[in-house]
Image (cartoon, rainbow, N blue to C red):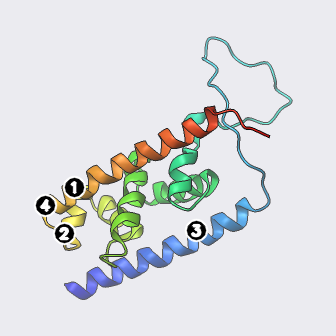
Amino acid sequence: MKSIAQIIIAGAVATGLTLGAAGTASAQGKGPVTPVRHTPMSHPSNSSSSAPKATKSETFPRGVATKLGSTPADMETAYLSAKQANPKLTRGQFIAANMVAKNLGSKNPAITTPAILSGLQSGKSIGQTLQGLGLSSKEAHDAQRQADRDAREAERAAADSAAKPKTP
């Protein structure tokens, strides 16, 4: 039983690395995506000549991506590939899986983003997945809370730095 779990984790890690490399390669030819305000459906845009731009809800928060050592475009690419494997995956779960893996991966090498995403795909919660990877119930709960705090703090820091005027 243990060897099957190791094979699944190894496969998930290999898939994650491959998708990350593919996302990086495809993102290199593109400029940064700038979020735009959502236009309500009752007021459609008339700019049919311009390409559709991503709305804020379609891109990853800059602060979270920076904290994870990535870019919003790379995070979006990785999320979309993970969502193909697990259509029920939410952005919040994806961000939490990445934050938890970043926070705990150095202490416990079995805790990786692909391992957590694999657990979510099999119908487990993040807490159940972490317990399956060797954490106690309390440790799993604490890890999830810390990941949520880190994500909020990263976004707050990014918003604060964007709001401050730059001095020459």
Seen in the picture, residue 66 relative to 55 is either above or below; the reply is below
Q: Residues within 10 Å of mark 4 (few under 14, many from 20)?
A: some
Among the two numbered marks 2 and 1 on one chain, the one whose residue lies closer to the N terminus: 2
Q: Nearer the viewer, mark 2 or mark 1?
A: 1
Query: Which residue has dot 2 on it?
Result: 135
Q: Residues within 10 Å of mark 3 (few under 14, many from 20)?
A: some
| Element carrying mark 2 | loop
Seen in the picture, residue 6 relative to 57 is either above or below; the reply is below
Left or right: 80 as drawn, with respect to 113 = right
- Alpha-carbon distance for marks 3 and 1? 28 Å
Query: Which residue has dot 3 on it?
Result: 20
- Please state, as top left, top right, bottom left or bottom right, where the N terminus lies in the image: bottom left
Can you tell which quarter of the image residue 61 is in? Answer: top right
Contact (Cβ within 8 Å) of mark 3 with mark 1: no
Q: Residue furthest front?
A: 168
Residue at horizontal 74 percent and vertical 35 percent from the top: 52
Between residue 97 and residue 168, name the one nearer to us: 168
- Alpha-carbon distance for marks 4 and 2? 7 Å
| Element carrying mark 3 | helix
* Place of residue 83 in the rendered image (x, y in percent of width and height, measured from the top left): 47, 54
